[in-house]
């Protein structure tokens, strides 16, 4: 029989002592077991579930943000994971996507599912059906349909943003425009309810839902009936045939009554305080186009994940929109006040606010663009080059459901649609850099002779817009585009005859990063962008996707020690990393000696003779006459 120390049987006082100490003994015995049990359950049950005693339910499991979800946000920026859904091949063959299933609205909210933006995981016995339903909208429709339309979200703003006050009386009102095509009921109306619940009523004139020829039956009469019951003015505008995002947004903009147009995608969730920062900036200067910070809603679990704020939008050599680390000038400026909006070279295009009259004065959208793609760059270039500005307001956060593939069809094929749109952007707004785009993107070049951009060129002339070189020099001076004052071409090693290449590994923001290597240079007419680099007058060696030739600081410092100091055997490897503007990415090319010298360390870029790799790994060594340290910069015409 177990008893607390000091307890002796047969004496009343001792028994009373035993009874007093008994809870201590029970706690000592059970507390370790309880902690072990809780730890084993932590991967499956959230603390919210434990508090409510709902762990006995077998039809759902709310999970904490695990390692797989944490991958959605890299320490240096957004990183959308490719992965958790097994794809169509893994879906249950027993559940076909019949018209009946596609047109069935299975929205059935479960209280507390998705509360505070928490993820929801479907249990094992429902996985097959979940995977089949995933194919309809290319996200976890089953999880979305279990989350209430008015679910709570965390306030993800910085504390200084939360404390900031906006005088509502002086702010302009807005019409919120949401275009949808066969959207899920739950995501569409969760977007609507997040606008209603988190927007000051006096600023919200209306919500316009623009239906781009949806075929799902519940998006017809059922939707009309539902929005008629909402506490704010909501109108559904319908296009009888598929017209695409650009023309559908124009349909909504022309019907809007608010002074400001606020565009949202149909699978968003607005957080507390999202609207006021946008309207404050537009109200202060009608030529500003203002975007929120775009947070991530997981396509797998519908978890709300806060994004990294210190990134801005730009584009790569193929004119694909990208998020890159913010430039040094803007970073230094933000140190004074992290709540201040910052300029961005381009916007993602799905979520932004713009003065309605200025939108039309500036030419609205290019109506010759089809369906979707490129309209965000076209509007970004036009705003900047014609006297306006594009900003991101760090105190405004809106979640967006990011998908790994599109569930929609593109009339004519996605390639033809996208290349035609991007070709229009380049031809109208990029001047000489249009030649660069078409020279290195032959798929887009095939559409160049078919373009008719006369009206958009006339618009540019009428608005007296600046040139694309002005845009590069003043809006995005950190760019990696070719220019007359910088080298553009291949960097060839004399010893191996191989060329420096862009790595294929992915780092933060999905940029290609890794050890610097050389590989085959291809033929004289080879125009593969993987071998193309620029070298700026400041000594930055950069390539597509805003990645630069880099050297690890600690290793180069040890290797570059002066005489009399303790020697070291560390041979630092050169690498390709995200361009940062830091001194470690500064190089100097000596044309006579044909060396690339790392400025901070004084070491030279070297392709060592003892490398047995198929692709030569590059290192930094003391400068000598070694042929492995000799490089030729071979210019390639770009315009």
Image (cartoon, rainbow, N blue to C red):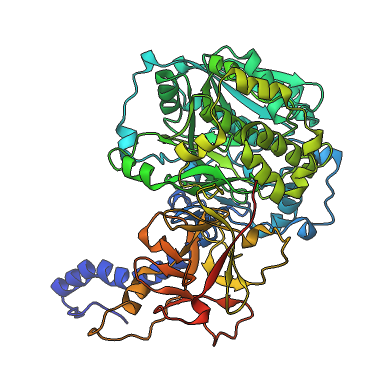
Residue at point 54%, 32% (across, down): 150
Quadrant containing the N terminus in the rendered view: bottom left
436 or 107: nearer the viewer: 436
- The reply to whether residue 248 is visible in this rendering is no
Q: Is residue 24 above or below residue 173?
A: below
Q: Residue furthest top?
A: 257
Residue at point 43%, 46% (across, down): 326
Which image quarter: residue 248?
A: top right
Percent position of residue 217, x then y: 79, 29
Q: Is residue 370 above or below residue 32?
A: above
Percent position of residue 199, x then y: 47, 24
Residue at point 16%, 76% (across, down): 11
Side of 121 relative to 574 (left or right): right
Residue at point 44%, 21% (across, down): 200
492 or 48: nearer the viewer: 492
Which image quarter: residue 20?
A: bottom left
- The reply to whether residue 22 is visible in this rendering is yes
Q: Residue furthest front?
A: 592
Side of 378 relative to 370 (left or right): left
Side of 96 relative to 548 (left or right): right
Q: Is residue 517 above or below residue 478?
A: below
Percent position of residue 225, x then y: 70, 19
238 or 539: nearer the viewer: 539
492 or 540: nearer the viewer: 492
Percent position of residue 342, x then y: 41, 36
Which image quarter: residue 101?
A: top right
Side of 568 relative to 9 (left or right): right
* Number of numbered callouts drawn: 0
């Amino acid at each position: 029989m177990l008893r607390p120390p000091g307890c002796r049987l047969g004496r009343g006082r001792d028994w009373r002592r035993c009874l007093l100490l008994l809870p201590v003994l029970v706690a000592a015995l059970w507390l370790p077991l309880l902690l072990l049990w809780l730890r084993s359950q932590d991967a499956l049950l959230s603390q919210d579930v434990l508090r409510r005693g709902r762990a006995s339910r077998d039809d759902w499991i709310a999970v904490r943000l695990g390692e797989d979800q944490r991958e959605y946000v890299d320490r240096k920026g957004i990183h959308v994971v490719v992965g958790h859904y097994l794809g169509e091949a893994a879906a249950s063959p027993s559940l076909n996507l019949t018209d009946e299933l596609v047109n069935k609205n299975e929205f059935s909210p479960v209280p507390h599912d998705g509360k505070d933006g928490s993820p929801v995981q479907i249990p094992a016995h429902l996985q097959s059906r979940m995977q089949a339903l995933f194919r309809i909208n290319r996200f976890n429709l089953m999880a979305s349909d279990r989350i209430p339309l008015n679910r709570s979200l965390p306030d993800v703003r910085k504390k200084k943003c939360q404390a900031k006050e906006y005088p509502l009386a002086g702010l302009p009102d807005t019409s919120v425009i949401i275009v949808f095509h066969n959207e899920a009921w739950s995501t569409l109306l969760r977007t609507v309810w997040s606008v209603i619940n988190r927007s000051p009523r006096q600023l919200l004139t209306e919500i316009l839902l623009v239906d781009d020829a949806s075929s799902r039956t519940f998006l017809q009469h059922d939707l009309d009936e539902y929005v008629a019951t909402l506490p704010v003015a909501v109108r559904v505008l319908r296009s009888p045939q598929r017209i695409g995002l650009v023309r559908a947004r124009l349909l909504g903009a022309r019907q809007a009554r608010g002074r400001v147009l606020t565009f949202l995608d149909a699978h968003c969730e607005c957080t507390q305080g999202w609207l006021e920062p946008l309207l404050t900036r537009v109200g202060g200067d009608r030529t500003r186009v203002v975007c929120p910070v775009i947070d991530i809603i997981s396509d797998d679990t519908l978890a709300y994940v806060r994004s990294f704020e210190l990134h801005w939008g730009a584009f790569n050599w193929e004119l694909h929109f990208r998020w890159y680390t913010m430039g040094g000038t803007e970073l230094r400026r933000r140190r004074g006040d992290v709540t201040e909006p910052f300029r961005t070279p381009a916007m993602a295009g799905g979520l932004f606010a713009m003065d309605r009259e200025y939108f039309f004065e500036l030419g609205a959208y290019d109506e010759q663009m089809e369906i979707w793609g490129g309209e965000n760059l076209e509007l970004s270039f036009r705003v900047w080059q014609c006297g306006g500005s594009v900003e991101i307001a760090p105190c405004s956060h809106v979640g967006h459901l990011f998908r790994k593939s599109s569930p929609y069809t593109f009339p004519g094929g996605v390639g033809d649609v996208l290349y035609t749109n991007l070709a229009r952007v380049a031809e109208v707004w990029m001047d000489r850099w249009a030649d660069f785009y078409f020279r290195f993107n032959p798929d887009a070049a095939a559409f160049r002779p078919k373009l008719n951009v006369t009206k958009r060129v006339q618009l540019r002339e009428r608005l007296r817009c600046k040139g694309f070189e002005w845009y590069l020099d003043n809006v995005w001076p950190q760019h990696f585009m070719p220019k007359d004052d910088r080298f553009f071409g291949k960097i060839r090693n004399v010893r191996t005859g191989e060329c420096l290449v862009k790595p294929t590994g992915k780092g933060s923001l999905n940029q290609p990063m890794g050890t610097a290597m050389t590989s085959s240079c291809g033929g004289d007419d080879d125009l593969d962008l993987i071998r193309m680099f620029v070298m700026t007058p400041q000594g930055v060696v950069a390539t597509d996707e805003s990645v630069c030739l880099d050297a690890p600081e600690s290793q180069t410092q040890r290797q570059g020690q002066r005489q009399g100091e303790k020697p070291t055997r560390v041979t630092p490897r050169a690498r390709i990393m995200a361009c940062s503007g830091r001194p470690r990415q500064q190089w100097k090319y000596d044309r006579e000696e044909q060396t690339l010298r790392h400025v901070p360390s004084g070491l030279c870029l070297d392709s060592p003779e003892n490398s047995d790799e198929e692709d030569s790994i590059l290192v930094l060594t003391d400068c000598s006459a070694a042929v492995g340290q000799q490089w030729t910069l071979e210019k390639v015409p770009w315009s």
